[in-house]
Image (cartoon, grey):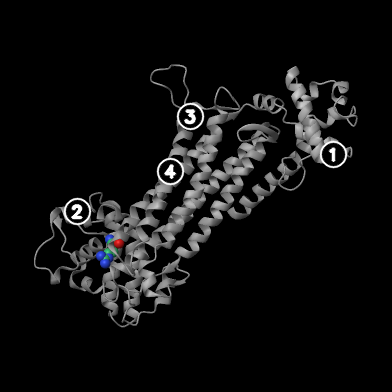
Amino acid sequence: MTQTKNLWGGRFTEGADQTFAEFNNSFGFDRRLFGADIRASIAHCDGLFHAGVLTRLEAERIKNGLTTLLKRADFDKNYFDEISAEDVHSFIESRLIQLVGDTGRKLHTGRSRNDQVATAFRLWLREEITDTSKLARQLQTSLLDLAEKNRGAVLPGYTHLQRAQPVLWAHWCLAYFEMLVRDRERLDEVWRRVNVLPLGSAALAGTSYEIDREAVARDLGFDGVTANSLDAVSDRDFAIEFTGACSILMMHLSRLAEDLIIYATNEFGFVELGDAISTGSSLMPQKKNPDAMELIRGKSARVFGHHAALLTMMKGLPLAYNKDMQEDKEAVFDTVDTVSLTLRVTEIVLRNITINAEKSRLAAAKGYLNATELADYLVQKGEPFRIAHDTVGRVVLFAISKGRELNELGLEEMREFSEKIEIDVFDALSLEKTLASKNQIGGTSPERVFEALDAAKRDLEIEAN
Ligand code: ARG
């Protein structure tokens, strides 16, 4: 393997220590920016031509050369491994010089690897954000499908993991749908801040060539150019924001996974896991384990870690660029990979579970989930809520002692606690009424939930067109 010459060899008389060189090199991972760096280089080349730095012929030669590198990398599997390089930028430059000769040495005029890497990184991330959002959208679709498939199904809603009030399964699905709406809004916002061109900031002070930065930005599809060269080469807010938005997204997926892990236990039994997403035990033949969900939950930790790493890496850096910042790549690359894989697996999970509506409905009908209903019933009959709450508390205590649910008590038994209770109480305590009464926007009444389900479907469809 031939080692490429360093880009900065002139003032050095001795070579680098081998171990330090390995420590310093980023080509092992930043080769992922190859395509983006080539595209940015082509735009920079045009910028140099319009600035009068390159002749038309030189610019054409360089651009053709860069395009050829792209194609070669595409079909030659060993392309990246034939020569060793410090980073993707030096790799491209040496390959270009190899291909087009000395003209290639003119490409780096008016730029530094500092604005170059910031540009390539943004260009690359811009597309990854779009892809991530698409995967999140697919997951939203699978949540809607699950809701649709189980339209009438009910489960106990929990607070403190204690049965609280019944809700529709579709309501549960839409809760996670909403989280993903916000996640995608956040990704959109990060995208907008990513989509600004740092090229032209050079090393830190700006470039002395008459490069039309706005034109280069347009060329690359950036919405604008960075306003301050010192900031531009050392700003990694966009990477931190991205891992931040992804951390929140992963936290949501982790909660969804946790819900399903609990619901899939024998103790709950609301959800049956398909074989496609389960694993067995090497020792216990009866086991069916929710590994997919556990890994979704576990992977979130990794993304939070990357977010924390970037913040920590940046916090002490004096302006402007410092080599510490090379550490940004692996954090962001792994975030992208982890999030996209987790989103895809979560979708597969949702498509491979069966809701046991009978069991979850039974659970929703047991455990006094309609106690609030009885209090509301008394309020309707003119009792102040605080008194009604106290009365119902005593009714519940009585019912527990009898081992019966509220609607299994006799009318006379209930009237011992309040004269206001009449025969219509049984209707008020039914599961159907309990659900139907939560009829304000955001509530779990079937009417509201189906409305929300339709609205969600419409939103996704509008977006698709
Ligand atoms: N590989 C470097 C990085 O990722 C590129 C920028 C190097 N700049 C420099 N001044 N050494 O940050």
Q: How far apart are labels 1 and 4 at the CA level?
A: 46 Å
Please tell me how many numbered marks the rendered image carries: 4
Cα–Cα span, label 4 and label 2? 29 Å
Report the residue marked by disc 2: 22
Does 340 appear above or below 127?
Answer: above
Q: Name the residue nearer the viewer: 442 or 341.
A: 442
Q: In the displayed structure, would residue 120 be above or below residue 253?
A: below
* Amino acid carrying mark 1 in the image: Val
Q: Closer to us: mark 1 or mark 3?
A: 1
- Of the image marks 1 and 4, the number of the one nearer the N terminus: 4
The quadrant of the image that shows the C terminus is: bottom right
Which residue position is annotated with label 4? 301
Mark 3 sits on what residue? 290
Residue that mark 1 sits on: 379
Does the beta carbon at disc 2 come under 8 Å from ligand 1? no
Mark closer to the chain start, 3 or 2: 2
| Left or right of 361 on screen, residue 270 | left
Q: Please, what secondary structure does the residue beneath circle 4 have?
A: helix
Q: Tell me, yes or no, if residue 465 can be seen here.
A: no
Q: Amino acid at mark 4?
A: Ala
- Name the mark on residue 335: none
Q: Quadrant of ligand 1?
A: bottom left
**Residue beneath the point at 32% across and 73% down:** 204
* Earlier sequence position, callout 4 versus callout 3: 3
Residue 70: horizontal and vertical position, in percent? Answer: 30, 59
Q: Secondary structure at mark 1?
A: helix
User: What's the distance in space between the residues labelled 2 and 1, CA to CA?
Assistant: 74 Å
